[in-house]
Amino acid sequence: MPAERTTPPTSPLRPADARLLLLDKHAVESLLHPDDVLRATREAFTLHSEREGRVFPVIRESLPAGGVFGIKAGDVPAQGLLGFKAAGFWPANRKQGGEPHQATILLIDPLTGRPVCMIDGNAITTARTGAAGGIGLQQLARPDSAALCVLGTGVQARVQAAFALRLMPSLRTVRYVSHSGAPDAAFEAAIGAAIASTSASTSASASATGTARCTVTHAADPNRAVSESDIVITATPGRGPLFDADALQPGTHINAVGTDTRGKRELPHGVLERAIVVADDREQSVTIGERQWAPGVACTEIGDLLTGKASIARQRGDITVFDMTGLALQDLTVGRMIHERAMAEGAGTALAWPW
């Protein structure tokens, strides 16, 4: 079962005593731990499968001034969990030295409608998406997968690779393809740190010999990199297909991360038609995910695999795809975890918020 919480919390404060907790990026980053994010993300998928958690229709629109704005909302009535994430992509932020992805999560008391906690959502979005990708690998990739190809070098590409290294100890090679076509020193440093961390904690032989269990190399040719890999992660802005369909070999698993808006695309035509397709949400995958380009392809939800409502008898030569669009429930379960930890540790800034 997804959680022990079965009774909605009461609202003990009088309206005049209500407070709003603010958690900025520094507070959030200090409270995020990969294993906790994995548990909260798994709970979100399970709640969705059991229909204990609701996912409301997604708002995702382009802005006249440039960028994309969206809202993902949902609730878990039996747990008193209600809220939304307002997020989007503002590419012009780069000129100011800022992060183009921006997200804010708001947790709301379902009994009164008052805001309870406002959370910087950037780190949460990054971590919960990375955790979702890791869960997809555990469910769908071949356990003996040794070669990983990452298309993209941004924040999400890094966290996807880090969770892959954390959860797939069989990996020996990480190839990456950059947008510029040139090596990316920052990406290599980040993945090198992830390799060192996982090697130290999971590989006694690596510690004994002083050698890393995995290497990271730049790949100039995306088709060759894909053809030589057991796992492919696409984590780009989704401006178009990243490789040729015939480069994909039998037995490969793909985490498709970057397509989360109408018109975006990372996978070439013909891939989904050849694959066993799994999504975080069936409807979202058709409206804003990769399945918008192949809506007739059958799809299983990842939560149903976790709860046992569905199963996949993966054969060694099967191609599998995890179409990741992101669930509001992921933001809410991770946001709640951060809120509870902040309350326990006295983190954040509490403001008087009478109503």
Image (cartoon, helix red, strand yellow):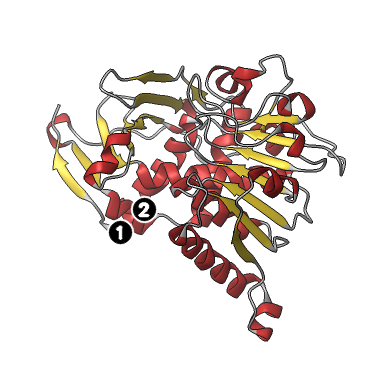
Judge whether 331 appears above or below 207 on screen: above
Q: Is residue 165 visible?
A: yes
- At label 2, the amino acid type is Arg
**Quadrant of the image containing the N terminus:** top right
Q: Are marks 2 and 1 in contact (CB under 8 Å)?
A: yes
Q: Which mark is residue 133?
A: none
Viewer-proximal residue among 7 and 2? 2
Q: Which class describes the residues within 10 Å of circle 2: few (<14), some (14-19), or many (20+)? A: some
Left or right of residue 109, residue 309 in this image: right
Q: Which mark is residue 345?
A: 1
Q: Position of residue 343 (x, y in %)?
A: 30, 51
Residue linked to disc 2: 341
Q: Residue at the spot x=70%, y=60% of the render?
A: 171
Q: Position of residue 53 (x, y in %)?
A: 52, 27
Q: Element at badge 1?
A: helix
Quarter occupied by residue 62: top left
Judge whether 302 appears above or below 153 on screen: above
Q: Is residue 40 visible?
A: no
Left or right of residue 295, residue 259 in this image: left
Q: Position of residue 276 (x, y in %)?
A: 77, 30
Q: Residue at the spot x=25%, y=31% of the render?
A: 115
Quarter occupied by residue 308: top right
Viewer-proximal residue among 297 and 125? 297
Quarter occupied by residue 17: top left
* Count of number-bearing discs: 2
**Quadrant of the image containing the C terminus:** top left
Q: Residue at the spot x=46%, y=30% of the render?
A: 328
